[in-house]
Amino acid sequence: MDFPHTADIVIIGGGVMGASAAWHLASRGTRNLVLLEKEPLFGQGSTGKCAGGVRYQFGTEINIRLSLASLPMLERFKDELGQDVHYRPCGYLFVLTDERDVQTFQHNVALQRRLGVQTEWLDGDEVRRRLSLMRFDDALAGTFHQKDGLVDPNSVVMGYIGAAQKLGVRAFSGVEVTGIRVSGGKVEGVEASRGVIQTRTVINAAGAWAGQIGQMAGVHLPIQPIRRQMFTTTPLAEIPADFPFVIDFAQALYFHREGEGLLIGMSNPHETPGFNQNVDEAWELTNLEAALARMPLLERARRAAHWAGLYEVTPDAHPIYGKTPVEGFLVCAGFSGHGFMHGPVSGKLMSELILDGAFSTVDVSMLDLARFEQGRLIKEYNVV
């Protein structure tokens, strides 16, 4: 495919955000659209290295509303785009061992129920009954929602990319953006490793690299890359098919079924910002020890694989949508670890902003870039 010299819209980033935006714009008639991804394959950044979890259980109204709009889109994905994304509603089970978390989650569950998310409240004994393979003597309570679960990230990205290409979107992988041309406070073009594209509209959907892309346009985005890592195990016959996505909230330790084994991860609270995606062997040992304490049968398994990826973290753990001080330079990034599940609706929202001038499916106008300078932060408690 010849590299274009002009485009109505250039999307930077071929993960779930960029792919979703491309398809939603194309499905509404946008044709002269270019998607650029620096990796050799689409979805190899944060999307391809995430745990694949999708959930309704959040602690702020806006995140719950994003889930209410986005997760049904994943359920309908095969019918609408012809791609099976392997949605598995195994449920998320948050286990609470700190009284302060219990009080906060009681408030969160009340909020979720008010918005139509019928999360179950479990006492400690019910948590232990449901997780008989695990040691949770210290569990005080838990929350569970059956419609939370797992989706295959690669299938979502490639489903959107393939459908968008059929509608005329020109999607390029292995092309790195090296500069944004700005004149008179307006976008004029995108400089890339294969050439320059003249355009008046750019969507920065570069995930953990969104801050760097912002600097190219002279826009400061408070988005920092934070390493997160996980590993998978060899098969464990004892793990039931309906094993939930378990989160030991106080330790930021999580388990979910992956094939015939488990995927296990644990957030390092001392991780410093940076683009290092090498596995920290010392932290992996800490993770393994914590996991063994909760699930002793892991002694029978071996590590099958391990990897690290990047969260794209903002000061309030909420994304940034929309306009910036540079006219035509738009942002859809900063999802702080829960971007994959909100990718479908986020692409739709960006298409609404560009084509209609406003967000309509969900009002995310409060998640603008200006909120950081104006002190309008919206803190999300329920982030692992």
Image (cartoon, helix red, strand yellow):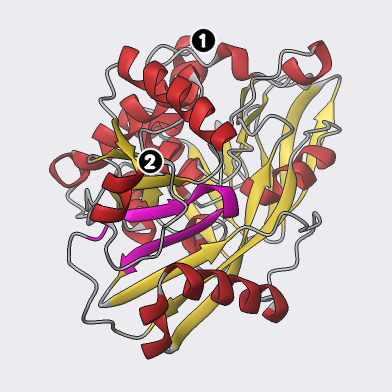
Q: Residue at x 28, y 82 (%)?
A: 236
* Occupied quadrant, residue 294: bottom left
Q: Residue at x 37, y 32 (%)?
A: 24
Please tell me whether residue 244 belongs to the stretch shown in magenta.
yes
Quick one: 228 or 43, which is closer to the camera? 228
Q: Is residue 340 left or right of residue 87?
A: right
Percent x, y for residue 358? 50, 10
Element type at marker 2?
Answer: strand
Helix, strand or loop: magenta stretch = strand
Identify the residue under disc 2. 142
Q: Residue at x 47, y 52 (%)?
A: 138
Distance from Cα at disc 2 to Cα at disc 1: 42 Å
Q: Is residue 108 left or right of residue 218?
A: left
Q: Residue at x 59, y 41 (%)?
A: 205
Percent x, y for residue 83? 21, 53
Percent x, y for residue 69? 33, 25
| Amino acid under disc 1 | Gly
Vertically, is 75 above or below 187?
below
Picture disc at residue 29: none
Count of numbered tags: 2
* Occupied quadrant, residue 203: top right
Q: Is residue 246 left or right of residue 338?
A: left
Picture disc at residue 357: 1
Looking at the rendering, the stretch of residues picked out in magenta corresponds to 243-257
Please indicate, yes or no, whether residue 28 appears anywhere in the rendered image.
Answer: no
